[in-house]
């Protein structure tokens, strides 16, 4: 008996995979946040969170192309950029000798720049030309991405060579990983919950997460740490 899968079946498979990975990311990300930083539990759950979010980003990309959705496409790239940048920051921090960034390091930043510009320009165009409302959220996330891309480009410009245990990288790791968790929490809330006004679900996690980022950044900024 030959089993044939239609395009819709493939879409459902990817959607289920996307949801499962998102649930894993929510759980492991929360554990990593509350666990002792640098401890075994933090590192193990953090690594699972990274791969789960990587899968979420890739599956978002595939789903957005199968049923073309520029919003989902850009958010998927946004999530990928945040988690890759956060994980890469930890790699830079743990270097044992100086390292010169290559195109492998810079390419995600260039892709992030193009995506950020699209996330800001596209909704403005749709609002002005077609009077479509309710997509201003994309501008906010695009602006956040643009800010991070600018910082990354500026960092590479000022630091053509990266030295081991540069404190800035561990701070960046905290901010980008927390930003990734904010993104997946937002996606979860807007898909399973209802609230009036709806922007609370979109921006609530960002507001709460921003306070947490500031807290952890301040906590670790003055510490001499080796993770």
Image (cartoon, rainbow, N blue to C red):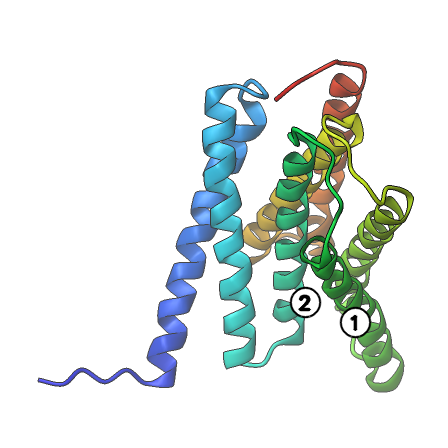
Residue at the location (72% across, 54% down)?
Answer: 102
Q: Is residue 163 visible?
A: yes
Residue tagged 1: 118
Residue at the location (61% across, 76% down)?
Answer: 69
Q: Secondary structure at mark 2?
A: helix
Please say if 97 is above or below 195: above
Residue at the location (55% across, 78% down)?
Answer: 65
Q: Dot 1: within a 10 Å radius of its alpha carbon, few (fewer than 14), some, or many (20 or more) residues? A: some
In the rendering, which numbered label is found on residue 96?
A: none
Q: Is residue 6 left or right of residue 152?
A: left
Which sits in the foreground, 151 or 218?
Answer: 151
In the rendering, which numbered label is found on residue 74?
A: 2
Q: Earlier in the sequence, mark 2 or mark 1?
A: 2
* Residue 211, horizontal then vertical, whole percent: 76, 31
Residue at the location (76% across, 36% down)?
Answer: 210
| Residue positioned most to the front | 97
């Amino acid at each position: 008996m030959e089993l044939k899968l239609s395009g819709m079946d493939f879409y459902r498979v990817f959607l289920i995979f996307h949801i499962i990975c998102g649930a894993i990311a929510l759980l492991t990300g929360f554990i990593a946040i509350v666990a002792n930083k640098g401890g075994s539990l933090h590192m193990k759950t953090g690594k699972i969170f990274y791969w789960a979010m990587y899968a979420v980003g890739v599956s978002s990309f595939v789903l957005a192309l199968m049923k073309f959705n520029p919003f989902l496409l850009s958010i998927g790239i946004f999530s990928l950029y945040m988690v890759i940048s956060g994980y890469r920051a930890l790699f830079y921090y743990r270097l044992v000798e100086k390292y010169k960034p290559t195109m492998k390091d810079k390419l995600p930043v260039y892709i992030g720049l193009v995506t950020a510009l699209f996330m800001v320009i596209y909704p403005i165009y749709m609002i002005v030309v077609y009077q479509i409302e309710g997509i201003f959220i994309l501008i906010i996330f695009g602006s956040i991405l643009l800010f991070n891309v600018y910082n990354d480009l500026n960092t590479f410009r000022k630091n053509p060579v990266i030295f081991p245990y540069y404190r800035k990288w561990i701070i960046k790791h905290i901010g980008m990983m927390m930003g990734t968790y904010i993104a997946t929490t937002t996606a979860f809330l807007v898909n399973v919950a209802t609230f009036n006004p709806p922007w609370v679900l979109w921006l609530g996690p960002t507001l709460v997460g921003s306070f947490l980022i500031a807290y952890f950044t301040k906590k670790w900024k003055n510490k001499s740490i080796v993770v």
